[in-house]
Image (cartoon, rainbow, N blue to C red):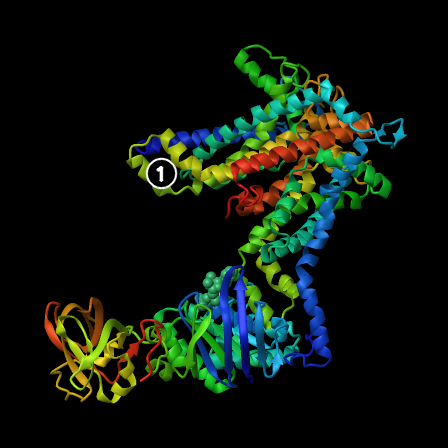
Amino acid sequence: MARLEIRGLRKSYGKVEALKGIDLDIADGEFCVFVGPSGCGKSTLLRTIAGLEDINAGTIDIDGEVVNNLRPRDRNIAMVFQNYALYPYLNVYENIAFGLRARKVPDAEVKVRVGNAAEMLGISGLLDRTPRQLSGGQRQRVAIGRAVVRDARLFLFDEPLSNLDAQLRDGMRAEIKRLHQEIGKTTIYVTHDQIEAMTLADRIVLLRDGLIEQQGAPLDLFERPATRFVAGFLGSPQMNFVETKLEQADDGLALVFDQDRKLPLDPTRVPAFDKWRGRDVILGIRPEHMSRSGDGASRKPAETPLNVLVDLVQPTGTRTYAQFRLNGTEITVELPSHTVERPGTTIEILVDMSRIILVDPETQRVIPG
Amino acid sequence: MNSGGATGETVAGPGGPALLTRASQAADRNFKYWMIFPAVLVILLIGLFPVIYTLIVSTQNLTMMDEDTTFHGLMHYRALLEDARFWESLLHTFIFVVVALPAELIFGLAMAYLFLERLPGRQIFVALLVLPVITSPIIAGATWRLLFDNRFGPINQILGWFAGEPVPILWTVDPNFVYPAILIAEIWQWTPFMFLLLLAALSNVDQSQIEAAELDGAGFWRTFTRIVLPAIWPVMAIAVLIRALDLFRLFDVIWALTRGGPGTSTETISIYAYVLGFQQFETSYTSAMAFLVIVILAVSITLILRRMEIDR
Amino acid sequence: MRADKGLGLTLRYVTAIAVTVVFLFPIYWLAMISFKTPEEIFAFPPVWWPESIQFANYAVLFKDGDVDTIWNSMVIATVSTVCAMFLGTMCAYSIARFRTGGNFFADWVLSNRMIPPIVIVFPIFLLYVQLGWVDTYVGLIVLYTAFNLPYVIWMMRGYIQDIPLELEESALVDGCSRWQVFMKVVWPMARGGLFATAVFTFVFAWNEFIFALVLTRSDVTTFPVQVTHYFGGQSNFWAKIAAMSMLGTVPIFIAVALLQRFLVRGISLGAVKG
Ligand SMILES: Nc1ncnc2c1ncn2[C@@H]1O[C@H](COP(=O)(O)OP(=O)(O)O)[C@@H](O)[C@H]1O
Ligand SMILES: [Mg+2]
């Protein structure tokens, strides 16, 4: 059981600054996910916590004890690696027992603890095999078993599922979540996959270029992104961004586009955006927050129609993605299947103006309101 | 080394154990130096001590008779420059290098091509062909001594079949035949070395590039110089370098076949240094020669490595 | 070239066999002499195939105690190989994982491999006279260890670099000290490379001649030196040369045959991986 407190953490590799000042608190028992594009410093942050990398500045504090100068073995942390890190010359039993052996735990206790861990992960039947004789999913379980058996105070996972095929990944994801609920240990999980992050996390820490871009509960981040980067990173397909202008229209404000198309702002949000009147902004709108008019559903008050010419149709079976151009930018809209059959059709799109965000083009930050 | 071992999962608190942890942390920091320390110590025995020792002794005047350890400057180096036997031994060494090295390379390459394409039982051929390489050079020399025997050896016998009359060549004595004899033994032993490395290198050449070149109408020679040679060059360079260094220190085979004879006609640097040092006990003079050889080697290796850029 | 596949294959086969016969003939001749009677050895014209395989030439070596030199070679080669492997792998690990000493150190280590034995044997001899190490096991063992270390370090560095770093990091997190990581992870993971490298280290020490010639007298004479004792001015002890050479060579042939797949990487300083 552990609380983690990180203050002003910096780490460089030669000239490359991988972490540029991280402040982070993780509560006892929390499932925290570090997410971000490849190369943003997720692994580096995780490895500094594990003690595998020296740091250049700042403190790492576990349960009130600064661990900066503790070696990995003295931090009492368990870690699961991307490529499983199983020892090919040991069988599954000895692989799981490795950490216990290193700490000279008596044989009898090793036996009990390995047995329990194997039971929990459903690999009791595999204990005599060597890693080579296991499938990817089984290897992953053994790797997790190695961590679980240790009874460490903090669990670290570095992209544990990225080597598995898609189907297996979904299953293992659920299992990791279940495991966390059972054991309740503080867990930090690194992934570049935003769906994994959304589904697993109590809290998401979104990293970008060695800094924390935003952190919070998954839905908080999804619904109230602080920056264009966060808004674009979470959600699939990505949020659409269109450069546009906020202008006076009738008795409120409207976003204006080419071909005289306009989207009047939701009256309730007008006061917040008032000082952006007449200025350039970037509109952010998720594909699922647009629909085709005349779908049968009655129109909500915040929805505003927009005439668009569809130039690309991508059916996925459950949904269909259609693309159209707006101010020279390709916009994707998510529609029910069969809503549009082929490109070249002009349709009327309804935009849910209560869900749009506006981004300051200078700072790339989301304008509050 | 074992701090925290017996305490199992409990983590060192702020009390005593933390001190232990800190101590072993220092051990961690110095770990990498401790790991190289013993090896470096032993290597210095051959890598530093002899160099310094020969340098010092070469400026004194130690001989079998005399224990004169006063400073004599570059006396021996000057004498060395005027020592015809030294220059001749250098020349002999040079002859062995420039004849044997290309011969081994060309024969090795030809053999590698012979075994490059699929040939059932190739593994067995390769396993047999490598045997000369792993034979002790002195044993190889001894073996050839038996083969070259003018009366009871098979070589003269076989030559006799072709000549149609008995061939009485004194291979290890006749000045006209000692060089061929030594070179044959040397080439016999080390051609398979070249063969093995070049076969491995050739097998790794991207086959599709060769096929593309052939489709473009390139002949064998063009394909070889444009595609194959650049691809095998790194391995070939290392093989040539290793063999050049070995040939430069050639000793065993000559020792077994001619001991540098007749007279001093097949004396290499190594043989001459041995004779000077261990038969005539010219301690300081030998040291000067040894040091000069070290300098020559150090300079040429540096230059060669830089030219070939095979370093990494 | 491709068209006449059948003919080409036959031709290549014939050539391959011819080449192999040429290269194996000296070894065959050596083996045959070791089995011949004195009359057969000194027959003119030479006897190409002995009447009967007889082991008298070997029996003499055993009776006179000449085979002790094989034992000496065995002790010296084995102990120096173990020492070189252990110290060398430690050093290689440090270089591979921590870049200890940087490129300069790695180059310096390798450059020691290039020193001709004749250059160092003289000062070493004088040093050993002082230390009383001439004609002792320890003298040759230390020297062969030193001479093999650069090779071991160079080779093992390559093998260690191929070990996934994650395995070591995982062990560190799991509670191993650096030394334990080396013993429990690096050592077993590098096993294949260790054997391959050890064979060549062993072969070098086993075959070495100059050092042994200078630094042994009678107590620890190694077999290559012993063979040269049979060289005479006019009459060579042919039977002994052949039998002794066989005793010293066949074990190496067997050892290397067992490690075929490491052969190329081993003798090319790792220039060819595989
Ligand atoms: N050992 C290293 N040496 C040099 N640069 C490194 C090293 N490890 C990571 N980096 C750099 O640090 C940055 C962050 O890397 P990392 O933490 O691995 O990213 P990711 O978020 O994909 O896990 C990257 O720019 C990477 O190139
Ligand atoms: Mg990563």
Instruction: Judge whether A350 appears above or below A69 on screen.
Output: below
Could one spot residue B299 in this view of the protein? yes
Determine whether, in the image, residue B57 is placed left or right of residue B3: right
Residue appearing at x 56%, y 51% in the figure: C158
Residue nearest the viewer, comparing C240 with A64: A64
Looking at the image, is C44 positioned above or below residue B232? above
- Residue appearing at x 73%, y 42% in the figure: B48
Can the viewer see residue B132?
A: no
Is residue C77 shown above or below B106? below
Q: Count how many numbered circles sit on residues in the image.
A: 1
Q: Which amino acid does label 1 sit on?
A: Ile
Task: Give the chain of mark 1.
Answer: B
B39, B307: nearer the viewer: B307
Image coordinates of residue B61 in percent, x first then y, are 84, 28
Is label 1 within 8 A of ligand 1 (CB to nearest ligand atom)?
no
Quarter holding residue C43: top right
The crowd level at tag 1 (other Cα within 10 Å; few <14, some 14-19, many 20+) is some
Return the x and y of residue C80 as percentages of the image width and height.
Answer: 72, 47
Name the residue nearer the viewer: C177 or C240: C177
Disc 1 is placed on an element classified as: helix
Q: Nearer the viewer, residue B90 or A249?
A: A249
Does residue B280 lie above or below A19 as drawn?
above
Q: Residue A244: name its quadrant.
A: bottom left
In what quadrant of the picture does the N terminus of chain C appear?
A: top left
Which quarter of the picture shows residue C223?
A: top right
Q: Give residue A325's position: percent from left, percent from top.
A: 18, 68
Q: Say whether residue B207 is left or right of residue B162.
A: left
Mark 1 = which residue? B210
Left or right of A243: which side holds B41?
right
- Residue C228 percent coordinates (x, y): 74, 30
